[in-house]
């Protein structure tokens, strides 16, 4: 079954623009999300395949509206809740501070 991220060969998305001078992160929070994901995988909280699947399970509207690292953040949030590390309410409470 195709998911929203499975757009290989699909027409209408335009050319991918590459900027050779583009930095790997556009903001500090993106680097933090990258580091957090690596730490959670190294500590066995989840596996890389689970992380990828969590990104692929985002709703089409979430997936298309989010930037690359926003998708990572949403996937990490989903997995932390699914693995029982945090509840949704606990993460919402931290976000609201």
Image (cartoon, grey):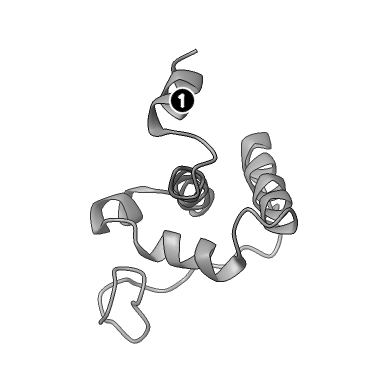
Apparent side of residue 62 relative to residue 66 in the rendered image (left or right): left
- Residue 96, position as x, y percentages in the image: 44, 16
Q: Residue at (51%, 65%) from the top-left corner?
A: 50
Q: Please identify the quarter of the rendering in which residue 13 is found.
A: bottom left
Q: Is label 1 in a helix, a strand or a loop?
A: helix
Q: Identify the residue at image location x=68%, y=35%.
A: 28
The image shows residue 88 at horizontal and vertical percentages of 39, 33
Extreme-top residue of the structure: 97
How many numbered marks, from 0 up?
1
Decide which of 19, 36 is in the foreground and name it: 36
Between 8 and 4, the residue placed more toward the observer is 4
Residue labelled with disc 1: 90
* Mark 1 crowdedness (10 Å alpha carbons): few <14, some 14-19, many ≥20: few
Q: Which part of the image, by quadrant, shows the N terminus? A: bottom left
Q: Given the current orientation, which residue lies at the most extreme front position?
A: 84
Question: Which residue shows up at 48% across the image and 46% down it?
Answer: 70
Residue 25 location, x and y as percent? Answer: 67, 48
From the viewer's perspective, is residue 41 above or below residue 18? above
Is 42 rendered above or below residue 12?
above
* Residue 62, image x, y percentages: 31, 50
Q: Residue furthest bottom?
A: 9
Q: Is residue 49 left or right of residue 33?
A: left
Establish if 64 lies above or below 11. above
Give the residue displayed 67% in from the left and 50% down from the top: 40
């Amino acid at each position: 079954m195709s998911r929203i991220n499975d757009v290989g060969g699909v027409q209408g998305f335009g050319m991918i623009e590459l900027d050779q001078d583009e930095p790997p992160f556009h903001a500090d929070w993106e680097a933090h999300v990258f580091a957090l994901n690596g730490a959670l995988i190294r500590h066995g909280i989840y596996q890389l395949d689970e992380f990828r699947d969590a990104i692929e399970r985002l709703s089409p509207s979430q997936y298309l509206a989010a930037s690359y690292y926003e998708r990572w953040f949403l996937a990490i949030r989903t997995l932390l809740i699914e693995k029982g590390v945090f509840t949704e309410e606990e993460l919402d409470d931290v976000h609201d501070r």
